[in-house]
Image (cartoon, coloured by chain):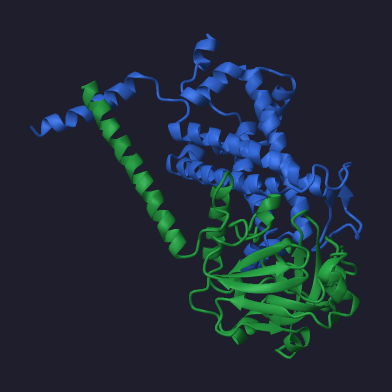
Amino acid sequence: MSNLLTRRKLITTGLAAAAGVAGLAVADRVANHYGLLPPDDGGVWGPGETLTYAAQRLLMAHHSMAREFNRSEISKAIPVSGEPPKDGPYAEMLADGFKNWRLPIDGMVARPASISVDELKRLPVRSQITHQACEEGWSFIAEWHGAQLWDVLSQVGVSAKARYVVVYAYDGSWDSLDLPDAYHPQTFLAYGLNGKDLPPPHGAPLRLRVARQLGYKSVKFLSRITLVDSLKNVGNERGSISPDYGYSWYAGI
Amino acid sequence: MADSTYIPEVAFQAANKAEAAPRYSLLVRITHWTFTLSFFGLVVSGIGIILAHPHFYWGETGNILTPPLFSLPLPTMLGGPSGWGRSLHFQSAWLAVLSGLLYVLSGVLSQHFRRELIPAASDLSWSSVRTCALDHLRFKRPDTSERYNVLQRLSYLGIVFVVFPFTILSGFAMSPSITSVFPWMVEFFGGHQSARTIHFFLANLLVLFVVVHITMVVLAGFVPRTMAMITGKSTARKEAR
């Protein structure tokens, strides 16, 4: 009789294990199909990163908007993290007021282009007064002015196969956005801060502004934008320079 | 023929009855230890995150250019960037929340909360709570019954149904993506930095609970109590005799 019990237990355990493995494999394929796997889904922190990204992408399936504030709530002073590059092409462009600065947009687009700040300013001007929190824990509220990233991307005609927008910066940083964040109305190419041109320490002449993620996602000193269908052949293949420093690609937290 | 198919079931039930009913169910034991592991991860990573910026503020914003509510006596960015802290905190939080949900669900379905944790109305009187508290302060050994006393019941219920939910909520309140869907979560705490400060104090309360919990386990007999939470079998009655 105890034999019967053991056999039953064995069969049940075996079936459960097989179902578990099959379930995981199916879940992986389904998650990938619906864009629920972050590019840094491997390694020790992979399970946590994947659960957080997938859960938040499902939760924000509609375009949920980051909170916006009144002018009276704007922070009096904004701390700077990360100085502008002191030499190289950036320093030269800074010296002559970014007259020759242009932003190439290439990759999976119909009409690759190279855009100046003046051309960006001719697109509809958008403003947002939003809260930006740093990964370290501090935060501030500021008003940002710029063009909606999506307004810019629609000028160059994004291929239906593109899945990520990769951004590069003059300070050696680079990052990428998935399409839900690239299309989001609060995702800006920002050229202004609190009513003035973007100061160099805050990313002049142009920075990204991603309202629903931590500050480090809002890359400063932009140098190039490129559209790709996969991050597999881009840099460290984990979608951003951040994982090199121990930070997550997805910073929605 | 039909009868024979029932034999294993009967045998199984008989075997179960022969042994004393376990003190803790298998699910409670598993979730207790997965939760222990995740709580340890949350505390270690929480300290790692604080080391990057050991200053606390009130309201929406706070940074090195604004006066803090209070600061821990530590240098800023001690231990360097805390990316690992975030990753460990979130991975642990997932394990903690999933274990916690499983525990609460089983406690509700098995009526564990109703039968063993919700105090009887008569025990909630001031004198009964005071007697129990004074017994604790005098280190009077509790009676040998395995029923939880009124202070245990109140602290377990308070931790599970008040402190933990508010700790999770104040954590969500710091997420720009979650508050874009549920702005009330951060408004409830009076701003992003208020939520961060409250999260810190609630975490301290949880650590205090764990310290008291382990102290009580040591006083009650560390090895037999810990074995009970691993094997499910309690030896408390034998000890008492």
Q: Quadrant of the N terminus of chain A?
A: top left
Q: Quadrant of the C terminus of chain A?
A: bottom right
Q: Position of residue A242 (x, y in %)?
A: 68, 56
Q: Is residue A153 visible?
A: yes
Residue located at (54% from left, 54% from top): A50
- Left or right: B80 as drawn, with respect to A47: right
Q: Position of residue A210 (x, y in %)?
A: 69, 70
Q: Nearer the viewer, residue B178 or B130?
A: B178
Q: Nearer the viewer, residue A145 or A176?
A: A176
Colour of chain B in the rendered structure image: blue
Residue located at (74% from left, 43% from top): B48
Q: Nearer the viewer, residue B127 or A226?
A: A226
Q: Which of the 4 image quadrants contains residue A222?
A: bottom right
- Left or right: A236 as drawn, with respect to B233: right
Q: Is residue B122 visible?
A: no
Residue located at (51% from left, 58% from top): A37
Q: Is residue B163 above or below residue A176?
A: above
| Chain in green on the image | A
